[in-house]
Image (tube, rainbow, N blue to C red):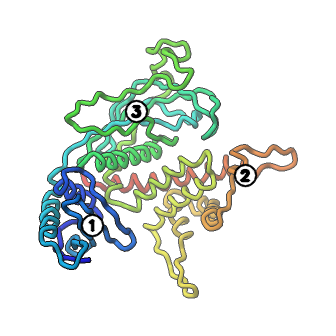
Amino acid sequence: MWESDIGVFPVSWASQGDEWVLHLSKTLVGRERIRLEGSYSEKVMSVGPADETLPSTLRVRPDPAGIRCTVVGDGDEPSEDQTQRWREAAATAAAGLGRHDRDYGWQAVLGPNPRRPDLHVPPLAGPARLGPVLLDPGGVQMREWVSSGPAEISEHEPSYSWPVIASGTVRAYDYNAADILAKFAVHRTCALLTLFCGPHWLPRIGPQVFDQRWGVPPLRVPQSVGERGQAEPDNKPLADFNTNDGDEPLWLPEWTADAWDALDTDRILATAVSAYYEATSMETDHPSAAFLAYVAAIEGIGSKLADLDRCETCKSQKGAGRRFRKALRTVMTANEAGKLAHAYDRRSATAHDGTLFGTEQTLGYPRISAFEYDSRFMFDILMVGQIRRASLRVVTKALSDAAARRPG
């Protein structure tokens, strides 16, 4: 086995490695994928062999100046021809970083979770923007038939919603990288809409990513979804059915225009927003886990207000509960915050030993008894709601304050 060090190339291991391998593969074999094996823990990648004319491999490790590459092959003496081919290809790939970027468009249909029809959201008042994402009213009151449980096959009551069309542009070196960026944008958009509007929002179609040159037609919200779908839902003319009557349209708060940039520059705040969003997705079926995530979102904001202390006896970190209380105090009095002190203990019981306080073990249904109330059902309908509202207030205030501090 021989090895030949071909030098260090100016490539960021974490942020440019995948793009570099893509360009390396195209340079060597003219296609997008080359054999790639590696170890995340040891931070070493093995690339190749490329084909029968280049049976050696390229070992890649991180280096303070980029990545260090070593050609490895069978035999006693290094092959200058193979070493030179790897060296030239590695240099060409490094020189190509960022030069193949182009704009990809994406679009998606977003809407409230259909399993919570009690949390009605009116139609969007008009076009709105969340950072790089454009939101347009779908113009359709979609009706769909949904099951009463996450895995039930039987149909349930119809659910009505006013989905929106989300669209944007991402810049990336290939389709797969663009697809991940679009999915991130959709997740954050749904998280912000959940924070602003109440119910859990999620992607209903897409995101669909496309090259800007393709001329893809815009997405449309379907009128009716499910086996009972029909052209005129509820026996009404579509013009009447798709007319909002009674509810005020949905207007996003003015400060939301700067919310995206605030999240881009504050990792702790972005994490708290995501934690709140994921909590809303679990609340119906996993109330104990949702409770834990709501507390975590509050605690995350509190990490900006109080540092952890180290226990002199066991040397472990302590003071997370203090962070929780300080975050609560940003939106409520000391007395109000004190009434939520129990929440941190319940959060810890679930986090550390898996205690379930809700109705998970009875599939979300309460135990009916004439002699005592079901504490698990009370947890679902009272305590989870209480901590959700507190988490919403804490996270929203932190985000609105951060957005207000944005320049301009």
CA separation, marks 3 and 1?
A: 38 Å
Q: Residue at x 37, y 74 (%)?
A: 42
Amino acid type, mark 1? Trp
Viewer-nearest of discs 1 and 2: 1
Q: For this rendering, which residue is in front, 131 or 147? A: 147
Q: Nearer the viewer, mark 3 or mark 1?
A: 1
Q: What's under tag 3, amino acid-wise?
A: Val
Answer with the quarter of the image where residue 216 lies: top left
Q: Which mark is residue 1?
A: none
The type of residue carrying mark 2 is: Arg
In the depicted structure, whether residue 306 falls above or below residue 120: below
Residue 208 position, x and y percent, is: 34, 37
* Quadrant in which the N terminus appears: bottom left
Element at badge 2? Answer: helix
First of labels 3, 2 by sequence position: 3
Does residue 22 appear left or right of residue 288 in this picture?
left
- As drawn, the label of residue 164 is 3
Q: Residue at x 24, y 38 (%)?
A: 211
Query: Secondary structure beneath disc 3?
Result: strand
Local packing at callout 1 (Cα closer than 10 Å; few below 14, some 14-19, many 20+) is some
Mark positioned earlier in the residue sequence (1 or 2): 1
* Residue 134 in sight in this render: no
| Residue 46: % across, % down | 30, 67
Q: Which mark is residue 376?
A: 2
Q: Is residue 104 left or right of residue 42?
A: left
How far apart marks 1 and 2 lie (CA) works out to 48 Å
Residue at image mark 1 = 13
